């Protein structure tokens, strides 16, 4: 009987250890999977900005998503976001946005970017700009941007557009 009890305890401890390893493995897989999804989201968002199709950028936002840039007035909804993005794409037809990094925080995800282009659009200055910033994203339950709070050095950007 002692022998049987020992085998039973050994079996239970091995089973628990395997279950624990499986749970930890699943957590790692889930974390990696969500990080991979986030990286793909950021890459696809960057590609949308580089597409010269402003509506494609807006599709990354919830239908009533909000974009706030440099503490300005909230831009709400895909139609308004499309109009905002179109302004940059028109002013900088050669624009290239690159994703520098994605940083996950408890308050959201920071999408760090770099913008390079030449202001050759209507009434353009023909001056080049090269500036960086970031957006802090919060997502809705569908994985779309609910709120994006963007920040960049507006004075530096304006100086570059003027050619100073």
Image: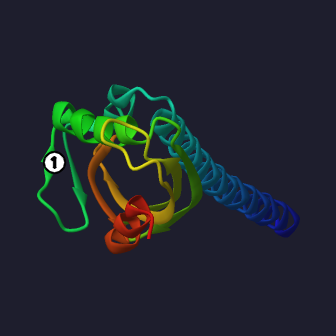
The colour scheme used here is rainbow
Q: Which residue is mark 1?
A: 75
Measuring 39% from the left and 50% from the top, which residue is drawn there? 125
Give residue 21's position: percent from left, percent from top: 73, 59
Measuring 46% from the left and 38% from the top, which residue is drawn there? 49
Measuring 68% from the left and 55% from the top, which residue is drawn there? 19
Q: How many marks?
A: 1
State the residue in front, 58 or 128.
Answer: 128
Q: Is residue 37 left or right of residue 157?
A: right
State the residue in front, 49 or 87.
Answer: 87
Give residue 6's position: percent from left, percent from top: 83, 67
Give residue 89's position: percent from left, percent from top: 39, 37
- Quarter occupied by the N terminus: bottom right
Does residue 125 sit above or below 7 in this rendering? above
Q: Is residue 1 left or right of residue 161?
A: right
Place residue 55 in its image quadrant: top left
State the residue in front, 52 or 107.
Answer: 52
Measuring 48% from the left and 54% from the top, which residue is drawn there? 127
For disc 1, the neighbor class at 10 Å (few under 14, some 14 to 19, many from 20) is many
Q: Is residue 80 left or right of residue 134?
A: left
Work out whether residue 25 can be spotted.
yes
Q: SS of the residue at dot 1?
A: strand
Does residue 59 sit above or below 11 in this rendering? above
Kindly give the residue lying farthest to the right in the view shown. 3
């Amino acid at each position: 009987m002692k022998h049987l009890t020992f085998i039973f305890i050994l079996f239970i401890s091995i089973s628990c250890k395997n279950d624990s390893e499986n749970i930890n493995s699943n957590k790692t897989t889930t974390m990696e999977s969500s990080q991979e999804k986030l990286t793909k989201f950021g890459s696809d968002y960057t590609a949308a900005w580089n597409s010269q199709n402003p509506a494609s950028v807006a599709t990354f936002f919830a239908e009533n998503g909000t974009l706030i840039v440099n503490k300005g007035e909230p831009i709400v909804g895909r139609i308004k976001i499309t109009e905002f993005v179109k302004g940059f794409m028109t002013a900088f037809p050669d624009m290239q946005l690159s994703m520098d990094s994605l940083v996950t925080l408890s308050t959201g995800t920071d999408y760090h970017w770099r913008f390079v282009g030449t202001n050759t659009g209507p009434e353009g200055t023909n001056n080049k700009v090269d500036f960086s910033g970031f957006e802090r994203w919060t997502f809705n339950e569908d994985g779309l941007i609910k709120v994006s709070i963007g920040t960049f050095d507006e004075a530096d950007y304006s100086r570059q557009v003027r050619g100073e």
